[in-house]
């Protein structure tokens, strides 16, 4: 049984236990393995700012990350919620990069969970003139965006 089948089976088991009859589609992409969930009841995973979706993503990454032979991660999405949130994060990071560039002052973004911080750091890394770092010692940390010196 290949990885896609094992992840699909695992997700179906978890969703069945939650009473959510969602369709599971596992798609391998260049930079991630997407687990897209669709169907009736999907909004249950999106309540409270998608905390349940974040928890599912964490569980899938914990269970299957070692089976990936590269630096990809699993992204669990439902009804394109995460895709939209990722686009918002990238847009906000670019806005703060422009603000840091024009003002010369570092900009703060957060508090963010590990997944959101990774999206921000990757966005900032696209511009060689900018840098980012996470500060804080809790699960939720702040990202500082600044001009590279």
Image (cartoon, rainbow, N blue to C red):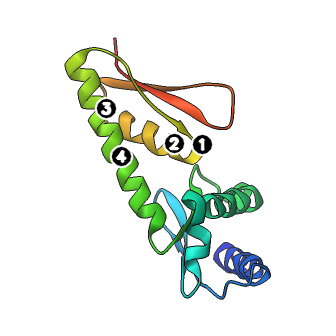
Query: Any mark on residue 105, and which?
Result: none
Residue at the far left in the pictured view: 102
Instruction: Looking at the image, tell me whether mark 1 or mark 3 is earlier in sequence order.
Output: 3
**Location of mark 3 (residue):** 96
Left or right, residue 61 beside residue 49: right
Instruction: Looking at the image, tell me whether mark 3 or mark 4 is earlier in sequence order.
Output: 4
Q: CA distance from mark 1 to mark 4?
A: 15 Å
Q: Work out whether 26 lies above or below 138.
A: below
Q: CA distance from mark 1 to mark 3?
A: 19 Å
Task: Give yes or no for contact between labels 3 and 4 (Cβ–Cβ under 8 Å).
Answer: no
Q: Work out whether 59 lies above or below 14.
A: above
Q: Position of residue 44 (x, y in %)?
A: 61, 74
Q: Residue at left 75%, top 84%?
A: 16
Query: Any mark on residue 114, and which?
Result: 1
Left or right, residue 113 beside residue 85: right
| Residue 28 seen anywhere in this rendered image of the structure | yes
């Amino acid at each position: 049984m290949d990885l896609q089948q094992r992840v699909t089976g695992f997700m179906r088991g978890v969703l069945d236990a939650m009473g959510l009859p969602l369709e599971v589609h596992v798609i391998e992409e260049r930079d991630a393995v997407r687990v897209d969930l669709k169907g009736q009841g999907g909004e249950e995973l999106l309540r409270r700012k998608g905390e349940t979706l974040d928890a599912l993503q964490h569980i899938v990454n914990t269970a299957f990350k070692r089976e990936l032979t590269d630096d990809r991660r699993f992204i669990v999405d439902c009804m394109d919620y995460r895709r939209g949130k990722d686009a918002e994060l990238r847009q906000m990071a670019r806005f703060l990069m422009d603000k840091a560039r024009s003002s010369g002052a570092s900009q703060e973004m957060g508090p963010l969970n590990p997944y959101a911080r990774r999206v921000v750091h990757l966005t900032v890394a696209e511009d060689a003139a900018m840098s980012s770092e996470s500060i804080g010692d809790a699960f939720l940390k702040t990202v500082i965006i600044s001009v590279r010196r």
